Image (tube, rainbow, N blue to C red):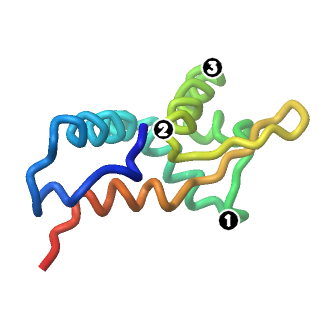
């Protein structure tokens, strides 16, 4: 997903078909409540990162389900993953989230 090449604010200019497709794919990732919550939990972690093992009980979903949602967020570029031994640690990518926010911005 190449959001860097995309997109002007939706309310400021008409999107091309490619831009609309790219934005829709990115927003579709966040349209799932579990993924939106995971992004929020990781982005607000006191240390700036969180071990995936800590997210399973917090989210109240099974480990495979949480792992799937985290992988989807990583694939979308909204989280990064660093493997440390058998544990995966996650960080938010604020620049990617900002691109989505800016696409919906209303400019005065």
Q: Is residue 28 left or right of residue 96?
A: left
Disc on res. 64: 3
Cα distance between the residues tagged 2 and 3: 18 Å
x, y (%) of residue 103?
A: 26, 57
Looking at the image, is 64 positioned above or below residue 10?
above
Q: Residue furthest right?
A: 85
**Quadrant in the picture for residue 23:** top left
Q: Of 16 and 26, which appears nearest the observer?
A: 16
Taking the view exactly as shown, the residue that stands out farthest to the top is 64
Return the x and y of residue 79 as percentages of the image width and height.
57, 46
Residue placed at 11% from the left, 63% from the top? 12
Position of the N terminus, as image quadrant, is top left
Q: Nearer the viewer, mark 2 or mark 1?
A: 2
Disc on res. 102: none
Q: Which residue is mark 2?
A: 76
- Secondary structure type for disc 1: loop
Residue bearing mark 1 = 46
- Please identify, in this view, whether the residue under mark 2 or under mark 3 is nearer the observer: 2
Crowd class of label 1 (few under 14; some 14 to 19; many from 20; radius 10 Å): few
Quadrant in which residue 51 is drawn? top right
Please report whichever mark, 3 or 1, sits nearer to the chain's N-terminal start: 1
Residue 44: image location, x then y, percent: 57, 61
């Amino acid at each position: 997903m190449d959001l860097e090449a995309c997109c002007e604010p939706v309310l400021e200019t008409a999107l091309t078909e490619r831009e609309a497709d790219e934005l829709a794919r990115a927003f579709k990732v966040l349209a799932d409540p579990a993924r939106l919550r995971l992004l929020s939990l990781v982005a607000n972690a006191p240390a700036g990162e969180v071990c995936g093992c800590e997210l399973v009980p917090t989210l109240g979903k099974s480990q495979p389900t949480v792992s799937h949602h985290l992988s989807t967020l990583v694939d979308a570029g909204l989280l990064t993953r660093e493997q440390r031994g058998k544990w995966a640690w996650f960080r938010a990518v604020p620049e990617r989230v900002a691109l989505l926010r800016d696409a919906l911005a209303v400019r005065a």
